[in-house]
Image (spheres, helix red, strand yellow):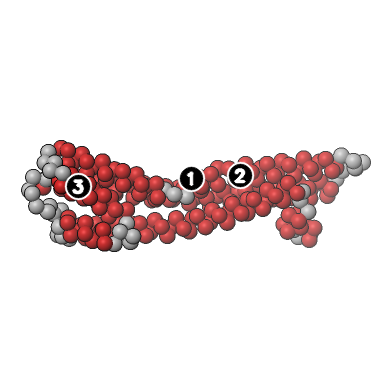
């Protein structure tokens, strides 16, 4: 390859606006890769903690024992255990207020779990909107740099008497680099977003299923007067 047509040479000789676009896209790409790896580890951790709590939940321990463990390890538990703790906390508060109506007890507990569910899903879905924005906007930012670079190249050729491919190619090539960098930033973000969106849906379905199962357990045992078990 001609050294004057190398990618580094094209970038270094691009116009200021095109260089600014390239730098912006590279920074966005780095940020998106950081978000991808962080979300990958976060989702693996959430899955592991949820599975661990499910195993404990169906192991035969009482709900009071599980609740005590959840409160004790509040900073280390996963979303499912925090939802369970919110429901049990509300259930116990309602019983302390001498509320014995099964409907009121279950409605209050379910509302508390739903509120906790929304908080947990907000945390699980964090970074997804950023990846979606990178995936949808980066190609257009790169295209803007390309259009600007081509305009700049043709403006510089206006004063020439004779224009050949050798004089046109460098300007167009350096402009197209911006589009390439935009695609480089967008493609991983789109792939990661689709993968994480599927994983988040699975987490949401599992949490909703747990809420319904836990509500059914409380409904069966609400009149027992003692600590219910799964």
- Residue identifier under label 2: 139
**Front in this rendered view, residue 14 or 191:** 14
Look at the numbered disc 3 and give the secondary structure of its residue.
helix
- Does label 3 or label 2 sit earlier along the sequence? 3
Secondary structure beneath label 1:
helix
State the image quarter where residue 212 is shown. Answer: top left
Which of the 4 image quadrants contains residue 143?
A: top right
Q: Is residue 54 left or right of residue 145?
A: left
Q: Mark 3 or 2, which is nearer the eye?
A: 3
Residue 46 or 183: which is nearer the viewer?
46
The reply, left or right, for residue 205 in relation to residue 19 is left
**Mark pair 1, 2: CA separation:** 16 Å
Question: Which residue in the rendered view is the most extreme toward the front?
Answer: 97
Residue drawn at 85 percent across, 42 percent down: 157
Badge 3 density bin: few <14, some 14–19, many ≥20, Cα 10 Å: some
Q: Position of residue 187 (x, y in %)?
A: 55, 50
Q: Where does residue 177 sit, x and y in percent of width and height?
A: 69, 50
Q: Is residue 42 left or right of residue 177?
A: left
In the rendered image of this protein, does residue 56 appear above or below residue 145?
A: below
Q: Residue at x 33, y 61 (%)?
A: 76
Identify the residue under disc 3.
93
* Mark 3 and mark 2: Cα distance apart in space: 53 Å
- Residue at 46 percent of width and 58 percent of height: 38
> Could you tell me how far apart the alpha carbons at marks 3 and 1 are, in whole angstroms?
37 Å
In this view of the protein, can residue 198 be seen by the observer? no
Q: Which residue is mark 1?
A: 129
- Residue at 62% in and 48% down: 182
Q: Which element carries disc 2, helix, strand or loop?
A: helix
């Amino acid at each position: 390859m001609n050294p004057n047509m190398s990618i580094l040479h094209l970038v270094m000789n691009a116009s200021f606006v095109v260089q600014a676009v390239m730098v912006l896209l590279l920074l966005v790409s780095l940020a998106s890769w950081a978000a991808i790896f962080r979300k990958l580890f976060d989702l693996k951790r959430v899955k592991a903690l949820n599975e661990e709590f499910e195993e404990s939940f169906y192991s035969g321990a009482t709900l009071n024992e599980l609740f005590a463990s959840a409160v004790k390890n509040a900073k280390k538990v996963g979303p499912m255990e925090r939802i369970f703790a919110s429901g049990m906390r509300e259930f116990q508060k309602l019983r302390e207020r001498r509320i014995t109506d099964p409907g009121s007890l279950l409605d209050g507990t379910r509302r508390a779990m739903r509120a906790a569910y929304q908080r947990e899903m907000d945390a699980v879905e964090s970074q997804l909107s950023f990846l979606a924005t990178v995936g949808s906007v980066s190609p257009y930012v790169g295209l803007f740099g390309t259009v600007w670079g081509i305009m700049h190249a043709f403006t510089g050729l206006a004063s020439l008497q004779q224009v050949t491919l050798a004089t046109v190619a460098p300007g167009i090539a350096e402009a197209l680099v911006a589009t390439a960098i935009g695609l480089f930033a967008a493609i991983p973000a789109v792939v990661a977003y689709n993968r994480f969106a599927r994983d988040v849906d699975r987490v949401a379905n599992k949490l909703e299923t747990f809420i319904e199962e836990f509500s059914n357990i409380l409904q069966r045992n609400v009149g027992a007067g003692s600590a219910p078990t799964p």
